[in-house]
Image: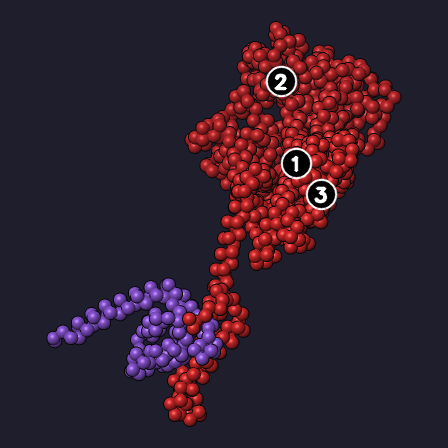
Chain colours: A purple, B red
Amino acid sequence: MGHDTSLVIIQGTLDVMILKALSSGAQHGYGISNWIRERTEGELAIEEGALYQALHRLAHRGLVEAEWGLSENNRRARYYRLTRVGRRELRDAQDGWRRYARAVSRVLDAPA
Amino acid sequence: MRFRRLFRFTSRTRAEIARDVREEVAFHLELRIRELVDAGWTPDAARAEAHRLFGDVTTTTTYCQGLDIEGEKRMRLRLMADECRQDVSYGIRMLGREPGPTAVAVLAIALAVGAIALVFAVVHAALLAPLPYLDADRLVVTRLSLPDYADMRDSVRAFERTGVWASNLYTLDDDQVLGGVVSPSLFTTLGVSPVIGRVIAESDRDAPVIVLGYNLWQRRFGGDPRVVGRTIRLTGTGYTVIGVMPRRFQFPSGDFQLWAGMGFSMAQVPGQLQNRALRIFQAVGRLRPGVEATQAQLELAALAARLARIHPDTNGGFSFVLTSLRDRQVGGVRVALLVALGSVGCLLLIACANVANLVLARTSTRLQELALRAALGAGRGRIARQLIAESSLLTAIGGVVGVLLAGWGMQALPALVGDRLPRIDDVALNVPVLLVTLAAVAATGILVGLAPIVHLAGTSLEPSLRGGGRGESQGARSGRLRSSLVVAQVAIAVVVLTGGLLMTHSLLRLLHVDTGVVPEGLLTFNVQFVHKPTPAARATTAASVLEAIAALPGIQSAGAATGLTPITAQRSTTFEVEGQPDAPVNDRGAYFIAASPAYFRTLGTAIVAGREFAARDAADAPLVVVVSETLARRFFPAGQAIGRQLRLVNPDYPADWRTIVGVVRDVRYQGLDDGARPIVYTPFAQTPFLWMYVHVRTAGDPMAMVGSLRASLKAVDPMLTVASPRPMTSLLAEASADPRFGAAVMTAFATVAVLLAAIGLYGVVSFAVVRRTREMAIQLALGASPQALRWQVVRRALALSAGGLIAGLLAAMWLGRYLTALLFEVTPADPLTLAAVAGILLAVTSIAAAIPAARATRIDPLQALREM
């Protein structure tokens, strides 16, 4: 395993974010990285190497598939897209995450 | 769409994966740097910042490459499994398309595989599976006398332990059971324990104790454990049952039903303890760990030499023959079993050739389809795999059906072969049998699958597509391959057929042996005199019994002897002829049989010279003997045997000179194949044994007399029984039962082999006829006669067959040396048999070829030419 320096994000969160980033279409690693940074407004420190490790792990698990394609400026780039399994995994993870967050929020927002 | 799919299944090498990952990371860093430079960073600062954001490049690269390589492997496996599934389902479709030929092929393989499994299971049980004794491989046996045994036990260092036994017939009620008279050390030497009770121990000394065999215990005592401690009467004497042996204890063979302590038995006949010439005993020795049988053999040779010096009369020229216990138990059937195994192996090969031919024919007609698949992108390897999948499927189904057939055959086996084969109860579909069967199936699959591959390897597929039909060159090529297969298959069939005919020929010779007796109407049974303590009492009782029997209505004549033709001579002796003391000792051995008056008349044995025994040859009368023709011819070639003298060299009897009063035709005592042996007959009254076999010639059904015979024996002495009454016809049948069985099995194998080869021939000839339809149509149109065409076809088949015949006959003559042990008066190169093989084969070939040949001449030339 590569060493994760971005301990600030909870394990597995990065995977879900990648899946979400790919839910609107195929994307290469650089694009995903930028997509996440824009959405989190830089609040999450994600080491880009870790992002690539996560991508290859997802590919290995069959949640995304990778293919060489041509980028906007006509360069060979490695594109990732969700597989059917990946799409289902994203849905489950989203549901899980929302329930988790709701439960934690209820506890934290409740009057002491 | 900016995303373009380049490949569906990319198969990447290790190097490609490494490059891909490096490129991917490089692409990322490059874009990041450009973005930063666009935002106003200096190139160097931008590069540093991009690397900081990314983290350690090597770590990520290595990690991603590792994952991808592993993923690639998994993907490749999945692809292969997919292809395999496709091949199999394609194979199923192909086989289903021609259900008839498929069924024939499956059946041929199933029969051959089933036969292999069955025969190998028998071979395994008899020859390979360990005997049920401790370290059974270290057990060896040798035939000897009791004094020799004592010397062996005390002097041969190679043996850790030794035991000794002799066989003995006991009368139990009105039945005879075979038993062993055994030393207590026999059980410890074998390392066996009883299922209940105990085995015979040294402490039993002279007590009459017996251990029952499992089968006898079940049959006669219903498996009742309380039998231990009971006394049962064997041949009129009470024996205490002290134990029961396990079912697998069959020592020295499955015929033995009980074992009696030697102490008691020897006390009855003390002479045997001292008689060095009475070699009716067998010793079993357990080799010390690390000692080879050869060392024991050397020590025994030294002992034999020493004994020959000390006791030249009895041990001159005698040597111990050491065999392993297993060889002794299965020696007789080993060759037969291996021949059977070889034969079924041949059947499997022939079946393989047949199926290969079928697959080949199918491949030839399918060349177009295969070419199409090749054109659509299937590689040659992929097409080969498809063909292999098809033949594997064929063999796999055949193999499964074959194993089922074998399992079914094993159930029927005991009823078919009875106790003819050793350890038949142990025959089962066990792991070794299944492994060998699997190997046979795999070999079949390879042989069958290879043919179309070999065919395909040298064939270009494209012309088939373009030409639209059978390319002439490929047809010829396939024809050649199929022809060689048929030649091979005919050759193998010839080998099996030769074996079958040799065995049949040998059986016919055996059945025509002059046994020296007229079997019809002859009844035999055993009478025991163990309860008569003195020789005189035995002689008197025997005479009274025969007198009483001869007086019964329906009995034409009655006689008795101590041997039973053709089952056993029981005793043999060394003898010396007056004036010829220096004749080699090996020539001076003979079967030793005590006979009553009228014995030869009852048997129907011709008196060549002199007379047979009469009532006047009593105990106190002058000592006389009758000799067999072979003995007379050997010692009195001029034919003047009558009146000359002969004496027994036998510690049981005084070496008095006995006058030869008669010469009789040779009688076969030890089996039909025993050859004509010298035989010395003495009057029972002068040498009364403990038993006799009574022979009576009856007017009607021999077995119908048993009741009145029994009654007349009881009238003479209530202790006497009619034991094991058997008609002579049934004894003769029993004596030829094994060869009869062997010949039947081999004939069955030969029939199947020839049929399979005929099917192969038929297939090839038919195929050739179809292929040459156009050519023959032209010949017909040009005025060739149908007969000439027919002859052309048959001649081609005969040529193929002749090739196989010659190869097969050569192989059969070479392999024949393994068969010699099973043959009687027939050599493996017997010209009559080989001529019969050739005749049968050429006849079968002509028939197999005549059918397609007839079809060839019914061609309508015009139509055939139009269709081309």
Q: Residues within 10 Å of mark 1 (few under 14, many from 20)?
A: some
Q: Amino acid at mark 2?
A: Pro
**Chain designation of label 1:** B
**In the rendered image, which residue does mark 2 sit on?**
B727
**In the rendered image, which residue does mark 3 sit on?**
B483
In this view, the mark in front (3 or 2) = 3
Q: Quadrant of the N terminus of chain B?
A: bottom left
**B292, B462: nearer the viewer:** B462
Q: Amino acid at mark 3?
A: Ser
Left or right, B810 with respect to B733, comes to right
**Chain designation of label 2:** B
Above or below, B246 relative to A82? above
The answer for how far apart the CA atoms under marks 3 and 2 are is 55 Å
Is there one chain holding both mark 1 and mark 2?
yes
The answer for how far apart the CA atoms under marks 1 and 2 are is 46 Å
Q: Quadrant of the C terminus of chain B?
A: top right
Nearest to N terminus: mark 1 or mark 3: 3
Mark 3 touches mark 2? (CB < 8 Å)? no
Residue at (64% x, 9% y) in the render: B699
> SS for tag 1?
helix
Left or right, A70 with respect to B442, comes to left
**In the rendered image, which residue does mark 1 sit on?**
B759
The quadrant in which residue B184 appears is top right
The quadrant in which residue B105 appears is top right
**Chain designation of label 3:** B
Q: Amino acid at mark 1?
A: Ile
Residue at (56% x, 41% y) in the render: B98
Q: Position of residue B183 (x, y in %)?
A: 58, 37
The quadrant in which residue B414 appears is top right
**B14, B176: nearer the viewer:** B14
The answer for how far apart the CA atoms under marks 1 and 3 are is 13 Å
Residue at (29% x, 82% y) in the render: A41
